[in-house]
Structure formats: C-alpha cells, structure tokens
Amino acid sequence: MAEDSAPVMRPNTLESMISELSEVTGMDFAEAESPFRTFMTGVESGVQESEFFGALLDIHSDLSGERVVGNIRGVEAWADGEQSFRLVPKSWESVVDKLYRINIEENRQFSLPPLVLDIHEQAARVPTPSRQRWITPDLAHQVADDLIRTKFVVPFADGVVAVSDRIIEATNRCGLPTYRRYHAKDSGYHARHHYALVSVPGYDGSDTTVAVEVKVLTKLQDTLGELTHMLYELKRTGTIRSEEKRKLAWLFESPDFSASYIGHAGHYIEASIVELKRKLQSFEGAINHG
C-alpha cells in the first residue's frame, strides 16, 4: 500500500515563506514587495473613488441614523473601536501567507503550478479554473479576493441578512460582477462576505480589476474573528498545535476548542436574542400606535 504524501511543513517566519515561494515560483518575492505596495496604494484610491464605495458609505450613513429597537443603533463600531467606515488593505505579510497557501499548502498539483479560480471566474460561477499558473504578487489581485476590505458590524444576527440585502441591491445598481459566501465555519465564525469587482489602476497604468470584500457580521462575531486571527497566527508559527476536527472536540483545555465552540454557541444565543428583539418590537409598535 502506498503511503500518504507527507504534509507540507509550514515555515514559521515571513522570510522563510518568501524564500520558499521564490524558489518554487521562480520570482523574487522580496523584490516584488515594493511594486505590490505601490499597486495597493492605487487600488485603495481607485476603490474610494468608485460608485460602489459611495453606495456603501450611504448604507453606513443610513444605518448610523437608524434605531433597530429602543436606542440600539443599526450599526456598531468595529472590534478595534473604529467608528468610521473605511477600507483596509491586506498587509504584505498576510499576502505572502495567502500566496504560500495557494501555491504550496493547498496546491494539489504538487510541483506544478496550482489550478485556482480567478475573481472573474468566481463571479461567473465557473466550476473549473481555465489557467494553471504560479500566483505571484503581481497576479495576486486576479485570484485573492480579500486584498481590499471593509465591513458592517451590526448589533443583531438578523441585521446580517438585512444589510446583506442592501449591499446586493447596491452592487446590482452599480452593474458590477459579484459573488458572495455565507460563512458557518468549523472555527465558529459566522458571517456573510460579499465581493464586488471594481476597476482600479493597474501595475502598468492601464485599468485592472480587484475584488472588494465586504463583510457583514455581528459584534460578537467580529470580536471572535479578531481572536481567531490571533489563534491562526499562533498555529501558523507553531506556538499552538493544530488538531484534527474530531480530536479537537475532546481537547477541552485547547484555545482552538474554546474558539470553535464559543462561536457556535454564540451564534445560537444571538439567534435567541433576535427572537427577544422581535417580541419587544411588537410591544414597542403597540405603544407607538396606542
């Protein structure tokens, strides 16, 4: 019986990942950092000037003035305390990490370039990638759909659905290609992610396209997302061991266990809070019409 292929041992430093990626792809990733940063500066400006971003700003402004029940505002501050609506470019370190996963960790072609859907294929719901190639920093925007991001943090779980509908309407009005993902991960993370393809300045001065990621999630899930990102970094660097899902269910002392089951339990509790909100809204309506 043939033995299973040995799992890829992830490097625990940025420099090690850059070295391995450079060797595998034939492109000097260290030299690619400066052009990539310049490109991302143009991406951020291009998205901010787009009709789509203006539509998102309008949604955020409307939510800021809404009270969904009592004095509870329709939109919350981010977990880091950010109150204003803004774009967040993906850091160079996170880009390298993502390209390591695409080219090496998740690449089922082994020594060959990966087969991976680009953002246009995802928007067109194409089932099979059309190209096999190494995804280098100058091509990252064609495949990675979270290079430029923003989010709506809402107080109640049903607000995730309501705000998502408004984002879909805005995307359609702007006539942009789009796709979305509804997350309910094993890690406990629950959210809706929307992706709109927006035209921005490219590396050579001509226009290109990037996906703008818009997350919609509750304050609890936003906070949990920040914690699980820290957990991911600890696992990536080998500080905390990654465990199999079935085994994890019995490792009660593991931070991984806590993050996963807090997330799932929290989602259930948030659904119950929605029911309480609806009951109170019915009384509020009766008072207003009494």
Image (spheres, rainbow, N blue to C red):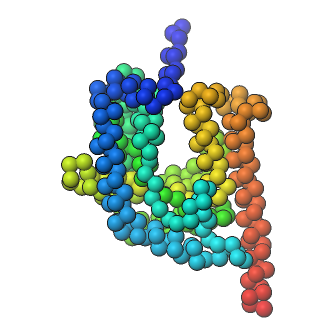
State whether residue 24 is above or below residue 194.
above
Rendered location of residue 213, percent (x, y):
45, 54
Q: Quadrant of residue 27?
A: top left
Nearer to me, 39 or 66:
39
Q: How many numbered markers are drawn? A: 0
What residue is drawn where x is 41% and y is 66%? 53
Query: From this viewpoint, which residue is outermost toward the bottom?
Result: 290
Nearer to me, 261 or 87:
87
The quadrant in which the C terminus is found is bottom right
What residue is drawn where x is 77% and y is 85%? 286
Rendered location of residue 33, percent (x, y):
34, 39
The quadrant in which the N terminus is found is top right
Nearer to me, 75 or 287:
75
- On the picture, is 217 further left or further right than 210? right
Nearer to me, 94 or 134:
94
State whether residue 98 is above or below residue 25.
below
What residue is drawn where x is 70% and y is 36%? 255
Rendered location of residue 208, percent (x, y):
27, 53
- On the picture, is 249 further left or further right than 149? right
- On the picture, is 260 further left or further right than 80? right
Would residue 179 be seen by someone viewing this image from the given angle? Answer: no
Query: From this viewpoint, which residue is outermost toward the top?
Result: 1
- On the picture, is 69 further left or further right than 239? right
Rendered location of residue 215, percent (x, y):
52, 56
What residue is drawn where x is 41% and y is 48%? 147
Q: Quadrant of residue 200?
A: bottom left
Would residue 266 be seen by someone viewing this image from the given angle? Answer: yes
State whether residue 19 is above or below residue 189.
above
